[in-house]
Image: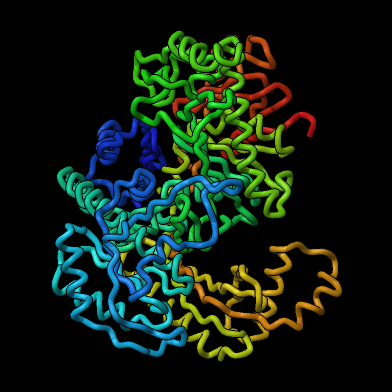
């Protein structure tokens, strides 16, 4: 396939991996992200790799542009046209509040009330048009918004999910009169019920559309200047990729683009070493993303909440994010309690040791001796971290206020950060009925390997996996991703009332759209997989079970059997099922809410170990020396190893530090490690 490039732009670093599939070679680059224009870091990284652009077959890009636009409130200027009486759906939301145990907090919708208009139209919940759309009102409302200099207009009419006729009529009117505006119809983005979530998802799409479009246009122009002639593919939150042109229309699909690529990498790399059930922890400079992989497949969700009151309801990898990265800022709150994050020093100004002003997790690890000041992540030749300044600021901002030495203050910072991370893992595992001990820990990102040992001990996890290049794993995930398009159609009827022919016809329509999408991308694929699922529940339940459906002709009985199996897996299974509860459940009608199809174009398989040089060295060759590291309240002289020189199948024990350009690995006492035949570092607690 030639040369492939995977790119992941994070809040602190931009990671790039260049694969030459003909020569089975790989090169990596990690460069500081440039927040003012993320494409600057991408181009600078490619130039540092001396990329010959005409020889590159494909660039696959994971991006945080859409996410940052939401979190920083720097999206496009948007307006909303809604059914008369429904313009405040965005603010009515659900019966929730920002803080569970208080009435404080605020909510600011992405579209303020003065840019939300109403028009006369009404469709019933059965799809019957009760009040025809008034075109003159639509034109008048849009003119008012255009005069207010909006860049995008959202059309969200009540019950448009069941009959989108009025939304499509309004969209056609607006596109004819204002061709330069981004026009988004909610039924095109999410043809499902729940008025607030559908409107919110469409608004998010419109809000980020101008920003993402400008970014992609600028990036593609810069790539063309360098004679790159192929398409630019973008990672979706579902773990598949799509073209830049499709991304311009559906930028909401990229909200978790980079983190999703990391989960794809974790799934593939761990699977090659025989691990099918994972807890994947991606700790970067700004945040920590935690997800689960079950039986070799990432766990999917039907939606997420970007921040309070801003849900998106799309098929995506279930990722839990907290502000706990290497750049997370430590501070003492008004109650005198040490807090770490969610604020981050980011790439600019960065941790204190990089020239910033606020103490961070990275500064704490440096003070404790775990990070080598002369071997920083993505460091340039001759550059070193300022240890003395880090000690001074941590002592002043944290130590003095808590009556702790600089080392004790640094250890406290790490303890608080690690416990926040452990808590996030418990929320996606224990709180959902999973025992972390049944999973392996896949730790990656620039900061992940520094806390892997702690998480094994804290959560009782037996084994961990640290890949060969933890710091660029998400870029690897981009490079190996598959094409993917997801479709959903709402039925919302009892299963007993649905004609199986209607179900088959719906899936056939999805497949036609998916095959057209795959054909349009014109990429070398080895096959196309089709996954059919349904959102099903027992009648009266609020939450549905996302149920995989078997191949072949579908009957009501086959669908019901699939749902019962999924229900038992989700809520717990005992020998013989639930006993008397089974009989009770059999009396409750089954409700079929949505039909889902995922059309996945499978890319040629790339295995990371095939691109790795196998070192002809000994463990002694990899030993760089020793330095004092703060271990259990005192400094202990620990061996330091160079990861690239570790022989495969080598074993070593903590306390020890393993260094490499994209991360640092810290092995606590009573933790041992071994390099396997795939170049992965397998770690485990000695009491296991």
Q: In this view, does 15 lie to the left or right of 631?
A: left
| Whether residue 526 can be seen here | no
Check the image and tell me how it is coloured.
rainbow
| Whether residue 39 can be seen here | yes
Q: Nearer the viewer, residue 672 or 592?
A: 592
Quarter of the rendering containing residue 519 = bottom left
Q: In this view, does 53 lie above or below 492?
A: above
Q: Residue at position x 53%, y 50% from top? A: 319
Q: Is residue 300 left or right of residue 541?
A: left
Q: In this view, does 450 lie to the left or right of 214?
A: right
Q: Residue furthest front?
A: 103
Q: Which of 519 and 491 is in front in this view?
A: 491
Q: Residue at position x 38%, y 51% from top? A: 108
Residue 390 % position (x, y): 46, 14
Q: Quadrant of the C terminus?
A: top right
Residue 527 % position (x, y): 45, 66
Count of number-bearing discs: 0
Q: Nearer the viewer, residue 509 or 118?
A: 118
Q: Residue at position x 64%, y 9% from top? A: 635
Quarter of the rendering containing residue 441 = top right
Q: Is residue 66 above or below residue 635?
A: below
Residue 339 % position (x, y): 55, 28
Q: In this view, does 679 lie above or below 564?
A: above
Residue 386 % position (x, y): 42, 12
Q: In this view, does 386 lie to the left or right of 653?
A: left
Q: Residue at position x 28%, y 68% from top? A: 117
């Amino acid at each position: 396939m030639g040369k492939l490039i995977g790119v992941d732009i994070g809040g602190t670093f931009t990671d790039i991996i260049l694969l030459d599939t003909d020569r089975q070679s790989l090169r990596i680059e990690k460069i500081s992200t440039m927040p003012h224009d993320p494409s600057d870091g991408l181009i600078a990284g490619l130039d540092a790799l001396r990329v010959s652009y005409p020889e590159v077959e494909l660039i696959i890009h994971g991006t945080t542009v859409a996410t940052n636009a939401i979190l920083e409130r720097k999206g496009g200027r948007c307006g909303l046209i809604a059914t008369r009486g429904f313009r405040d759906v965005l603010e009515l939301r659900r019966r929730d509040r920002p803080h569970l145990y208080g009435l404080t907090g605020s909510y600011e919708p992405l579209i303020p009330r003065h840019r939300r208009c109403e028009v006369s139209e009404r469709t019933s919940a059965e799809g019957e048009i009760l009040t025809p759309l008034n075109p003159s009102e639509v034109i008048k409302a849009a003119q008012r918004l255009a005069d207010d200099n909006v860049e995008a207009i959202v059309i969200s009419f009540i019950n448009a999910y069941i009959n989108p006729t009025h939304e499509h009529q309004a969209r056609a009117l607006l596109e004819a009169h204002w061709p330069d505006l981004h026009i988004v119809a909610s039924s095109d983005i999410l043809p499902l019920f729940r008025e607030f979530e559908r409107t919110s998802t469409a608004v998010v799409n419109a809000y980020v559309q101008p920003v993402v479009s400008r970014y992609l246009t600028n990036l593609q122009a810069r790539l063309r200047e360098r004679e790159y002639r192929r398409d630019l593919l973008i990672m979706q939150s579902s773990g598949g990729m799509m073209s830049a042109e499709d991304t311009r229309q559906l930028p909401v699909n990229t909200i978790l683009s980079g983190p999703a690529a990391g989960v794809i990498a974790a799934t593939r790399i761990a699977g090659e070493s025989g691990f099918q059930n994972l807890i994947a922890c991606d700790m970067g400079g700004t945040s920590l993303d935690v997800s689960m992989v079950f039986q070799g497949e990432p766990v999917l969700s039907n939606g997420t909440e970007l921040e309070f009151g801003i849900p998106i309801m799309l098929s995506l990898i279930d990722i839990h994010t907290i502000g706990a990265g290497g750049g997370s800022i430590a501070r003492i709150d008004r109650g005198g309690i040490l807090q770490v994050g969610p604020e981050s020093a980011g790439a600019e100004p960065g941790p204190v040791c990089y020239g910033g002003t606020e103490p961070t997790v990275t500064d704490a690890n440096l003070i404790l001796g775990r990070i080598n000041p002369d071997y920083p992540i993505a460091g340039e030749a001759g550059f070193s971290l300022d240890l003395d300044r880090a000690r001074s600021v941590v002592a002043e901002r944290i130590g003095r206020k808590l009556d702790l030495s600089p080392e004790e203050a640094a250890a406290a910072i790490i303890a608080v950060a690690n416990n926040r991370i452990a808590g996030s893992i418990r929320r996606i595992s224990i709180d959902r009925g999973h025992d972390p001990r049944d999973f392996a820990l896949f730790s990656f990102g620039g900061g992940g390997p520094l806390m892997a040992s702690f998480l094994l001990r804290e959560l009782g996890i037996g084994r961990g996996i640290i890949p060969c290049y933890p710091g660029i794993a998400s870029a690897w995930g981009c490079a190996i991703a598959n094409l993917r398009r997801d479709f959903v159609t709402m039925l919302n009827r009892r299963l007993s009332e649905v004609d199986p022919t209607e179900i088959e016809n719906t899936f056939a329509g999805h497949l036609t759209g998916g095959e057209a999408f795959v054909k349009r991308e014109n990429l070398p694929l080895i096959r196309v997989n089709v996954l059919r699922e349904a959102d099903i529940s027992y009648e009266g339940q609020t939450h549905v079970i996302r149920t995989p459906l078997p191949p072949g002709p579908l009957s009501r009985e086959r669908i019901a059997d699939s749902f019962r199996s999924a229900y038992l897996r989700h809520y717990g299974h005992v020998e013989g099922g639930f006993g008397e509860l089974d009989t009770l459940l059999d009396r409750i009608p089954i409700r079929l809410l949505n039909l889902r199809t995922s059309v996945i174009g499978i890319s040629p398989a790339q295995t990371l170990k095939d691109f790795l040089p196998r070192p002809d060295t000994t463990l002694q060759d990899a030993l760089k020396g020793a330095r004092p590291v703060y271990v259990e309240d005192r400094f202990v002289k620990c061996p330091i190893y160079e990861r690239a020189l570790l022989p495969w199948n080598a074993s070593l024990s903590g306390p020890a530090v393993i260094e490499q350009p994209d991360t640092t690995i810290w092995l606590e006492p009573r933790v041992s490690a071994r390099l396997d035949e795939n170049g992965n570092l397998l770690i485990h607690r000695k009491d296991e």
